[in-house]
Image: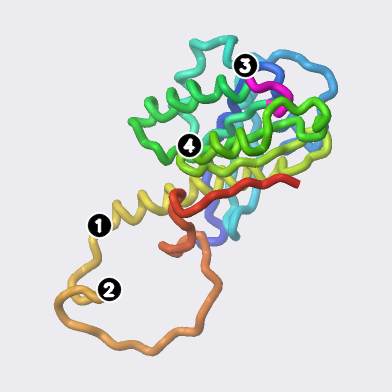
């Protein structure tokens, strides 16, 4: 199978307090619909194929219960997921504050890795008149978490909805690439400018960088992203 046709599968967990719009975000992304009524979720799972940087990816999306419900299931989906959308409502400061504990649990379950693929999502941006969380407050949280991307979304208007899923998927892919480089081990002597014989070769035409390039993605500490439309 060609590299372009190879499909990876990643698990993404959508986490946050009850009522912040996790199910609405997921349904809007997967089905293109907005759910008007609020029905507390136990846990739902969805699958959607998307293309990210020229790669076909199958996302398994776990729409989880609110933080105050079914906490016994929390460790399972945190352990199983490759990446996370941490969602709060811009109309509730408490919903943002509750994410701090969840993020700490995720890092702990992932072996203390501070670079777990995470996107911070401020949902309900269409309710600007009811805003209780300023953009600067949310952005400071994203910076404190290691410059994780911060988006403001509206599930009702589909604003930035596909973008948050693509962003966390891209982070997972970057982590996959880093792991693959470690598994390959150090370069052989004589290559890559190290000691030993040197080799000359004709310069190849420049090409567009893809997911497989080692320097395609910048390290998180060099990034700082806040997306508000």
Nearer to the camera, 188 or 20: 20
Of callouts 1 and 2, the N-terminal one: 1
Badge 3 density bin: few <14, some 14–19, many ≥20, Cα 10 Å:
many
Badge 4 density bin: few <14, some 14–19, many ≥20, Cα 10 Å:
few
Q: Position of residue 25 (x, y in %)?
A: 72, 32
Label 4, secondary structure: give it: helix
Real-space Cα separation, disc 2 to disc 3, in angstroms: 50 Å
- Horizontally, is 174 left or right of 167 in the view? left
Of callouts 4 and 2, the N-terminal one: 4
Nearer to the camera, 35 or 103: 103
Badge 1 density bin: few <14, some 14–19, many ≥20, Cα 10 Å:
few
Label pair 1/2, CB-CB below 8 angstroms: no
Looking at the rendering, the stretch of residues picked out in magenta corresponds to 89-93
Q: Where is residue 168 in the image (x, y as percent from the top left)?
A: 56, 43
Label placed on residue 185: 1
In the rendered image, which residue does mark 2 sit on? 192
Real-space Cα separation, disc 4 to disc 3, in angstroms: 23 Å
Identify the image quadrant of residue 46.
top right
Q: Residue at x 48, y 21 (%)?
A: 101
Label placed on residue 47: none
Q: Main SS of the magenta segment? A: loop
In the rendered image, which residue does mark 4 sit on? 144
């Amino acid at each position: 199978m060609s590299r372009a046709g190879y499909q990876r599968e990643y698990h993404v967990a959508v986490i946050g307090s009850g009522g912040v719009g996790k199910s609405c975000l997921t349904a809007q992304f997967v089905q293109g619909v907005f759910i008007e009524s609020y029905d507390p979720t136990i846990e739902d799972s969805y699958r959607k194929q998307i293309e990210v940087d020229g790669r076909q990816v199958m996302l398994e999306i776990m729409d989880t219960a609110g933080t105050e419900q079914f906490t016994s299931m929390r460790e399972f989906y945190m352990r199983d997921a490759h990446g996370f959308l941490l969602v709060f409502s811009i109309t509730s400061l408490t919903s943002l504050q509750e994410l701090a504990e969840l993020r700490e649990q995720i890092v702990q379950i992932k072996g203390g890795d501070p670079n777990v693929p995470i996107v911070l999502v401020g949902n309900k941006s269409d309710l600007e008149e009811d805003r209780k969380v300023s953009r600067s407050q949310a952005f400071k949280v994203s910076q404190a978490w290691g410059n994780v991307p911060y988006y403001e979304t509206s599930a009702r208007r589909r604003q930035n909805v596909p973008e948050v899923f693509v962003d966390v998927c891209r982070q997972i892919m970057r982590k996959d690439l880093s792991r693959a480089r470690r598994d390959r081990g150090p370069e052989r002597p004589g290559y890559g400018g190290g000691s030993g014989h040197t080799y000359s070769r004709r310069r190849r035409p420049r090409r567009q960088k893809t997911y497989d390039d080692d320097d395609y993605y910048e390290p998180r500490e060099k990034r700082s992203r806040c997306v508000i439309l």
